[in-house]
Image: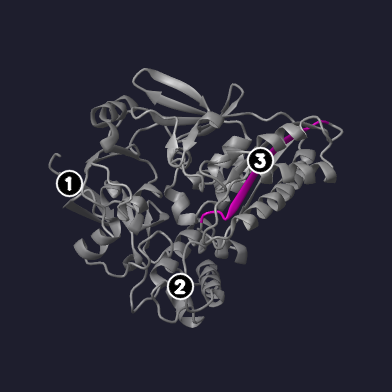
Amino acid sequence: MTTKKVIDITLKVNGKDRAAAVEPRLLLVHFIREYLGLTGTHIGCDTTNCGACTVLLDGRPVKSCTLFTVQADGRELRTIESVGTSSALHPLQEGFKEKHGLQCGFCTPGMIMSACALLEKKPHPTEEDIRWGISGNLCRCTGYQNIVKAVQYAAEKMSAPSTQA
Amino acid sequence: MIPRAFDYCRPKTIPEAISLLQQHGDAAKILSGGQSLIPMMKMRLAQPDYLIDINQIAGLEYIKEDVGYLKIGALTREADLETSELIRSRYPLILDTAFSIADPQVRNLATVGGNLAHGDPANDHPATMLALNAEVIATGPNGQRSISIKDFFISLFATALEANEILTEIRIPIPPARSGGAYFKLERKVGDFATVGVAVQVTVDAKAICQEAGIGLTNVGGTPIKAQHAEDFLRGKALDEANIRQAASLAAEDAHPSSDLRGPAEYKIAMVKELTKRALTKALNRASQER
């Protein structure tokens, strides 16, 4: 057996260039949480089911528990930390708050990242589009109805001419 | 869950990837979408010493019609099938299948080639490709060879690919006019493997007489299953209710599921029959609408 080499990578995370030397087996979600300290991305099931660890890789939602960090080399990553701030919420965050789209909140970062990608592709989604868009994200509290309403709220707000998000 | 340590290689060309395979043999695994392999590595069901990441190899992501075939590059993501105008307008069976695989996040990474090369009878594309009589292009040290999909699945997780070969393309004969297909998947929830899945592709003449029928079954045996008896029965017959019912019974006879947490074997066999009936009916409708 040969030595297990560490690999140098560079990637863009939430608009900033980052460099790191990582073991090939380091999962992206561990890199995000433990190396970058961005703990908004959650580890839920750790088995590609629940979607709590959803992040955007080159704009597409992926499950960061099922991707090695080395695979993100040279690519662009967006996490929940890039979506609004506590003083200026993103319309999606506002929607989740207004429409009671969360109870325990554990699935929320993943839900918002999936919804974010959906609204970037489809600014005026139907209810079916929204349900399709979050079908890879599990919520065990709300039963989805209010999550759908939260995304609808954001879609309306983001397409209203007076509010520039 | 953390996989066992491994060395990571990222070849830029197919010959480079093949020489790595030759060098490392069984100790290496190809990483394409990774949506089956990485979970298996995390559970330590797979423990490769070398991971050969082929995602940087250019020119393996495409969906195009070319000299009689629909050609799909092995690295084509499932999500790209969903948005392809060609697939949407002419290959309803493939579109149905793409939508039913796992969930949107997984489909953004998962590849069509990987779905086949993994050799898992619970995956969805194997049944689809069996119904479409696809060919798989394997590239190795001596160039390319074509493998008929019906000879591709050997046993659980084992395919006809040699240890030094990479699946590089899937070829599907372009269906003639009045063809249609459908995929029905019974699943407990989004993202689960099929309890049972049935893929159907038919070609009919102007009087709805079946010219060609392909039927593939998901997750009802040690390999994906081609329901040959039902296919043979349908050829030359009217696709009426009685014949569809008979074909569905024959397809159910070809299924050999085992009882597990998704249901008892008897239930799965009954579902093969029902889903075959529904898929044939839908495929016929679609074929009739085709010019």
Label 2, residues with CA under 10 Å away: few <14, some 14-19, many ≥20: many
- The residue marked by circle 2 belongs to what chain? A
Between A122 and B93, the one lying in front of the other is B93
Question: Pointer 2: what residue?
Answer: A91
Q: The residue marked by circle 1 belongs to what chain?
A: A
Task: Assess whether residue A11 is covered by the magenta stretch.
Answer: no
> Could one spot residue A58 in this view of the protein?
yes
Circle number at residue A8: 1
At mark 1, the secondary structure is strand
Residue that appears at 25% across and 48% down: A70
User: Residue B192 at x, y = what percent?
Assistant: 51, 58
For mark 3, what is the residue?
B89
Which residue extends farthest right? B207
Q: Nearer the viewer, residue B91 or B226?
A: B226
Q: Secondary structure at mark 3?
A: helix
Q: Position of residue B187 (x, y in %)?
A: 58, 58
- The CA span between labels 3 and 1 is 44 Å
- Name which residue lies at 33% across and 50% down: B45
Which of B143 and B277 lies nearest the eye of the viewer? B277
Per the model, the C-alpha gap separating discs 2 and 1 is: 37 Å
A35 to the left or right of B58: left
- In the image, residue B32 lies at what x, y percent? 38, 41
Amino acid type of the residue that numbered disc 3 sits on in the rendered structure: Ser
State which region is magenta: B193-205
Badge 1: how crowded within 10 Å, few (<14), some, or many (20+)?
Answer: few
